[in-house]
Image: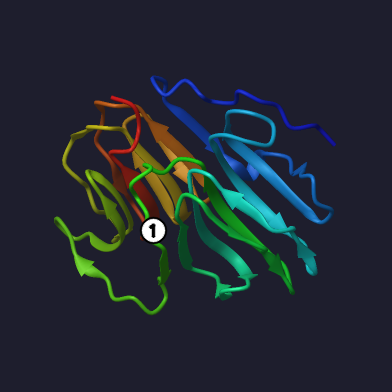
Amino acid sequence: MQQLKSNINMDFSKKVMIDTNQLEWLPSPLKGVTRKPLAREDLESGHATSIVKYQAGSHFKRHSHPQGEEILVLEGVFSDETGDFGSGTYIRNPPGSSHRPFSTDGCTLFVKLNQFDKNDLQQVRVDTHSTPWQQGMGGLEVMSLHDFEGQHTALVKWPADEVFQPHRHFGGEEILVLSGLFEDEHGQYPANTWIRSPHMSQHHPFVKEETIILVKVGHLPV
């Protein structure tokens, strides 16, 4: 098994596209917990974006999040002392928070560490399976998850054959394709693809089949 490396995709001026289905699971310091690193500053600290898998019965010791933690539960049930969070739960643990996470039956997570503004102190728990969709532009449906000073995180549901207008991303855009096939003039992005586009990047996205994406905008260096 390969070992984790530091300084992965930390140049925020460049577009990154990763089909996470093609990545190998790498070990973590805890037995039974593996990950697929997407962006990483240092080996076990600093800015990190990863897909993380807990085998059944896995657990972490108590640890803190100096600059916050953001999670979307992709599969299974993720737990800590505050509760049990099933597939589709969106979680934000603010800077300075700590917890002791575990998974009784196993789970897979999308995790972003140490990327919060120091003043973004709201703790968030959203069950996206029970939260209603809101009408967006065109045929899109949107589920807002978090907003803070120009940074926005949401789920977006695209109906089949939807074409969006060409647009730029002030403060960049980050996407995780959750289902379907997301497309633009640069390529096709199947489920579990992670895309990070830099400040003022531009594209003309569309889909041919119903597609759901996790979108984060306005959070990258300008």
Q: Residue at x 48, y 49 (%)?
A: 68
In this rendering, position of residue 185 left or right of residue 149: right
Quadrant of the rendered image containing residue 201: top left
Tally the marks. 1
Q: Quadrant of the C terminus?
A: top left
- Identify the secondary structure beneath mark 1: strand
Q: Is residue 115 at all visible to an observer of this figure? A: yes
Q: Quadrant of the N terminus?
A: top right
Closer-to-camera residue (153/139)? 153
Closer-to-camera residue (138/170)? 170
Q: x, y percentage for residue 182?
A: 39, 47
Q: x, y percentage for residue 23?
A: 67, 39
Q: Residues within 10 Å of mark 1 (few under 14, many from 20)?
A: many
Q: Residue at x 32, y 56 (%)?
A: 154
Q: Residue at x 61, y 48 (%)?
A: 51
Residue furthest toward the front?
Answer: 96
Q: Is residue 78 at all visible to an observer of this figure? A: no
Quadrant of the rendered image containing residue 210: bottom left
Q: x, y percentage for residue 46?
A: 57, 34
Q: Which residue is mark 1?
A: 212
Quadrant of the rendered image containing residue 78: bottom right
The amino acid pointed to by label 1 is Ile
In this rendering, position of residue 43 left or right of residue 193: right
